[in-house]
Image (spheres, rainbow, N blue to C red):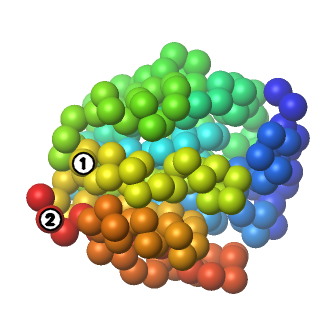
Amino acid sequence: MTDRKVITKDGSATYYSEEYGESYHSLSGAMEEADKKYAQVCGIGEREDVVILDICFGLGYNSAAAIDAFNGSSIRIVGLESYQGIIDEISRMGDEYPFKCHNIMKQIASEGNYEDEKTYAKLIMGDARETIKSLKKDSFDCVFLDPFSPNKCPELWTKEFFEKIYRVMKKGGVLTTYSCARIVRDNLTAAGFNVRDGPVVGRRGPGTVAVKDQA
């Protein structure tokens, strides 16, 4: 792996992608961003059960934040990721992995899945534009959308890809992402979502929350 480790301002580690010229998480705090822009936005800690689609799984921080926050009876996660190198880093990380469920995440990284009495997770490797086609319609309560920025990875911010996400979400489902770029919000709206500001966490602008109001 050519990516290099970076310690963010809240003390949690992330990696800098040489290919994309960006870090995988906000340098203001990788752990904080996963918790406040993803798990908290979707109200994971208040749900009795939840089904999550984690697009651009990476180090698994967004899913890990959700697992750590969850207090209900059943949490199910499907992660989509294209780069095996970043998945391998989950198992290599030691105490610097910032979430309590590191052992769960290591099993997901090494075996592609995890299951216990309340937690189920599956990782699907490949181009998310293709792998999402295998998912059932109206399946997900929450979507964590965390690609590299629209300038670096435009293919995962298009109206066409958002329409594929919309198809697999339940009515009332919530998509959350760190980006507030105009093109992102316009494409989400064109795909059928109701769009609003997400929280401001470490960056100058807010994140974006998009809700599927129609079946």
Q: Measured from the top left, where is residue 63 in percent x and y? A: 49, 46
Q: Residues within 10 Å of mark 2 (few under 14, many from 20)?
A: few
Q: Position of residue 200 (x, y in %)?
A: 58, 81
Q: Is residue 70 placed above or below 86 in the rendered structure? A: below
Q: Residue furthest left?
A: 215
Q: Quadrant of the N terminus?
A: top right
Residue at 69% x, 83% y is: 204
Quadrant location of the C terminus? bottom left
The reply to whether discs 2 and 1 touch (Cβ–Cβ < 8 Å) is: no
Looking at the image, can residue 104 be seen? Answer: no
Residue 2 locus on image (x, y percent): 87, 31
Density class for disc 1 (Cα within 10 Å; few <14, some 14-19, many ≥20) is: many
Say which residue label 1 marks. 167
In which quarter of the view is residue 82 placed? top right
**Left or right: 102 in relation to 192:** right
Name the residue at 75% across, 35% down.
94
Q: Earlier in the sequence, mark 2 or mark 1?
A: 1
Q: Amino acid at mark 2?
A: Gln
Q: Is residue 129 above or below residue 151?
A: above
Answer left or right for 203 relative to 139. right
**Of 32 and 153, the residue lying toward us:** 153
Label 1, secondary structure: give it: helix
In the image, 158 versus 127, the foreground residue is 158
Q: Does the rendering let one see residue 202? A: yes
Vertical placement of 162 versus 78: above or below?
A: below
Q: Secondary structure at mark 2?
A: loop
Q: With 1 as the anchor, is 87 left or right in this view?
A: left
User: Could you give the CA–CA distance between mark 2 and mark 1, rounded to whole angstroms?
Assistant: 11 Å
Kindly identify which residue carries mark 2.
214
User: Is 47 in front, or is 130?
Assistant: 130
**Residue 112 x %, y %:** 49, 21
